[in-house]
Each structure stands twice: as structure tokens, then as C-alpha cells.
Amino acid sequence: MLGERFLLEVALAEGALATLAYALLMAHALGLGIARHRNSSRLAAARTAVAAVLQADSPTSAVPAALAGLSLRRQVRVLAELAVSLGGEQRRRLLSLASDAGLVARAQRRCASRLWWRRVHGARLLGLLGSGESVVPVLFGDRRAEVRAQAAEWAAWHPSPLVIGRLIEMLADPSNVCRFTVKDSLLRIGRPTVEPLADHLSTRSGAAAEAGLTVAVGLADPRFLGSGLRLVSDQRAPTRALAAALVGALGGAQAAQALVTLLRDPDPSVRASAAKGLAAVGHWPAAPALVESLRDPAWAVRRQAALALRALGAPGLLLLRRALTDSDRFARDMAQTVLDQPDTVARPIAA
């Protein structure tokens, strides 16, 4: 009897605990719903206030009050949503709003934080707001690669001569992430990069030139031709391959002659890059040399040579058809493979 009573009390206690847990969960869910609704209303009000100011429909004093009820993360969200699509006068007005709301000052303080993730957040925020010229350049030399990469991303929106010079120095950064971000920022900056990058490449060789060559290929400015022609004779095969890509992108008689010579390079990646460059140049006198490359022991070289021949038009197609009876089985197979491809596919590809 006593045992049954004890079991009943345990069951009742467990039921009470389950009911209490359910009530707490429902209260928590209700609280989250109310908070979500309140935050949504505040976000909507802040967006409306900022948009009205950007359209010059209301005084700027309305914005700090609208943002005051939001967390820093949500304040950034409101302004970031607009910043990515604005330019000119409206972007300047947005920066003024962010400054009035205290966001710029907070971001600048974060850039000086001892915590690296706060420095990253500060640089990112200043990049969105279009500010930070006085604090972010210091982060180019930060001890953390994540911070340096974020500073390099910020630089794409602030292409002053000093900033571009620092970016070019960072092409030798030991971090892959930093180098990738630096190259992306230089390509986004575009034409202002050309002159300082050409000066940089004129004195570099080997591995020190390779990151700059990658950017130069993307920009394809004639001012890079001298460095490209010099570096096709570099001791390092990766450097020669990138130089071949550069002179191929620039074109001209000198470039074509250098590329034909590189078809006999000891490294297959260089030979493939040279064949691809000849396709871009469209130098039909190189056709016999490309036919010889159809017999290359490296598949990538044969592939690029065949694509280059097809890119030459009628003369190249004729030579590809003749290669169908070549004594070399690899040359026959590659010629057939490229001839069978549709025009939208049969284009030079990266080796």
C-alpha cells in the first residue's frame, strides 16, 4: 500500500514538472514572438526614417532616434542594406547619418581593440559606411591575417594612391587569404592600379612577381607588356606560365613570337599557357608550331594546342582535320575531340 502511494506521488510530481516545463516553454516562445514583433516594428521604422532622409524628405535628426532602440547589430543591418546599393550624394548622406548615430565612432574604436574579431568588425563596418581613412590603413600591418584581409577589402572602396601602394606591398603577404583579397581589391579598383603595379612588376621576378602578374592578366593594360616579355624567361615555371598568360592577353607581334618560343618550354604548364595565349592572340603563322604541340606528351598542352588551332578559324580547322590522319595517336584523338565539340564549348580553357 505504501509503495503504491509513493508511486502515485512520484507520478503526480512528474506531471507537475512536465506542466511547469511546458508552461515555461510557452512563455519563452511568447516572449520571443513579442520581441521579434517589437524588433520588426523598430527595424521597419528605422528603415523608413533612413530612407526618408536619403530622399531629403525629412530632417536627419529623426534617424538617431529611430536607431536608438536597436542593437548595434541591427543598426548596422539597416544601414548596410542601403549602403550596398548607394553611391554619390546618397552614400555621403548615409555616412553622415551613421556618424550622427555614433556608429562611425564605435567602428573606429573597434579597429583599435585588442580583440582581433572586433578589429575585423570595425573595418567591415567602416567599409560599408564609406569611412575609416584615418584608422583602417594601420590594419594593413596587423598581426592577424583576418584583420589584414578585411582591411584589404575595405581598400577597394578607398583607392587613394597611398592605399593602392599598400595593397601592392601586400601582394607578398604570407597569408593566402590576404593575397586573394588584395588581388580582388586591386582588380576592383581597376585603372588607377595600372601605373603603380607596372612599376612594381618592372623590378620583380620569380615568386615575388606572381601575384602581381595575376592582377596584370586581369587588367590587361599595354603598360605591362615589357614586364611580361621579360618574365617569360624567368627561372620559375609558374612565373613563366603567368607571364605567357599576360602577353597572350595583351597581344601583338612580340607577344606572339614569345609564345611560340614557349611552346618548347621544358615545363608542361608553361607550354599549355603559351598555346592558350596564342589562341587569344589569333596569330595564324603559329599554326605549324601548334600542330607540333598536338603530339606533346602532356594532355593539357595537346588540349590547348587543339583549341588554339580551332580559334584560328578556317586555317586551324583545316590543320585539325589533317591531324585526324596523323601518325601520332594522341594527336589524332585530341584533334577529333576538339572538332567534335560545339562552338560554345571549344574555346581555350585554363591549363
Image (cartoon, rainbow, N blue to C red):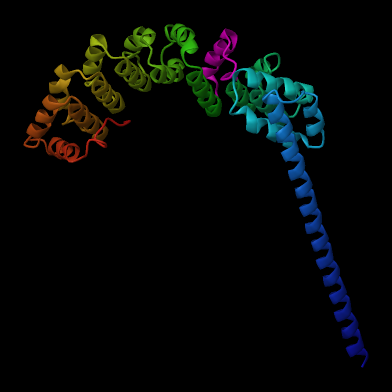
Residue 200 at what x, y percent from top left?
A: 47, 9
Where does the N terminus fall, quadrant-wise?
Answer: bottom right
Is 244 positioned to the left or the right of 30 in the image? left
Q: Nearer the viewer, residue 227 or 348?
A: 348
Q: Determine the residue positioned at 84% across, 62% down.
A: 24
Give the quadrant of residue 90.
Answer: top right
Where does the C terminus fall, quadrant-wise?
Answer: top left
Give the quadrant of residue 347.
Answer: top left
Give above or below for 320 relative to 3: above
Q: Please provide the residue range marked out in magenta.
A: 155-174
Q: Is residue 158 magenta?
A: yes
Q: Is residue 72 magenta?
A: no
Residue 247 at what x, y percent from top left?
A: 31, 15
Main secondary structure found in the magenta portion: helix
Q: How many marks?
A: 0
Using the rendered image of the protein, determine whether residue 161 is visible from the camera's viewpoint: yes
Q: Determine the residue positioned at 21% across, 40% down.
A: 341
Give above or below for 301 relative to 208: below
Is 179 positioned to the left or the right of 311 in the image? right
Q: Determine the residue positioned at 51% across, 26% down.
A: 180
Q: Residue furthest bottom?
A: 1
Residue 97 at what x, y percent from top left?
A: 74, 23
Using the rendered image of the protein, determine whether residue 116 is visible from the camera's viewpoint: no
Q: Residue furthest front?
A: 57
